[in-house]
Amino acid sequence: MRRTGLSLVFFLLASLLAFGQSTTSTAGDTTPSTPTPVNQGELNHDRRDLRHDRRDRRQDRRDLRHDRRDVRADRRDLHQDRRELRHDVKTGNTTQAARDRADLRKDHRDVRANRRDVRYDHRDLRHDRRDLRHDRREIHRDKQGK
């Protein structure tokens, strides 16, 4: 009884396979590499995703440039504050020296924050680069009809 059940399953699968091949061969005008409507939708989605990833990458590069510029400006401020602190300590101006120390601490925090932003932007660029490669592969696969 079990054997007839399996042979029935194989018969149904074989007939479905034969029916599927006969319907695709009668279409005639489509080739396997021609995108189907569902495949075309996936292709459009992948292209849109590719555009968004490229835009993200441009924005991350812009952010990276701005953060590096901010780090350079904060380092210049640090050098200026150190000079002023040395001058105030040398002249005995303790009130101004205390303000300069507070400015130095603030500038150190700013430099650390901007360097952290640079690291995050590098990470984002790396992720966007990976996403771009993935999307390009997806588009290529969709064009191939696989």
Image: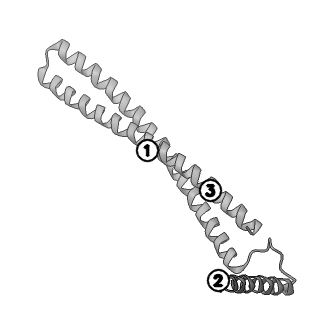
Query: Which residue was labeled with disc 2?
Result: 2
* Foreground tag (1 vs 2): 2
Q: Quadrant of the C terminus?
A: bottom right
Distance from the alpha carbon under mark 3 to that under mark 1: 21 Å
Query: Which residue was labeled with disc 1?
Result: 120
Label 3 CA crowd tier, 10 Å (few <14, some 14–19, many 20+): some
For badge 2, the amino acid type reads: Arg
Q: Is residue 104 above or below residue 142?
A: above
Task: Identify the image's colour scheme: rainbow, by chain, secondary structure or one colour.
Answer: one colour
For badge 1, the amino acid type reads: Tyr
The circle on residue 134 is 3
* Foreground tag (3 vs 1): 3
Report whether 28 appears left or right of 118: right
Task: Pick whichever of labels 1 and 2 is earlier in the sequence.
Answer: 2
The image position of residue 28, as x and y in percent, is 87, 83
Q: Is residue 44 above or below residue 52?
A: below
Q: Is residue 48 above or below residue 80?
A: below
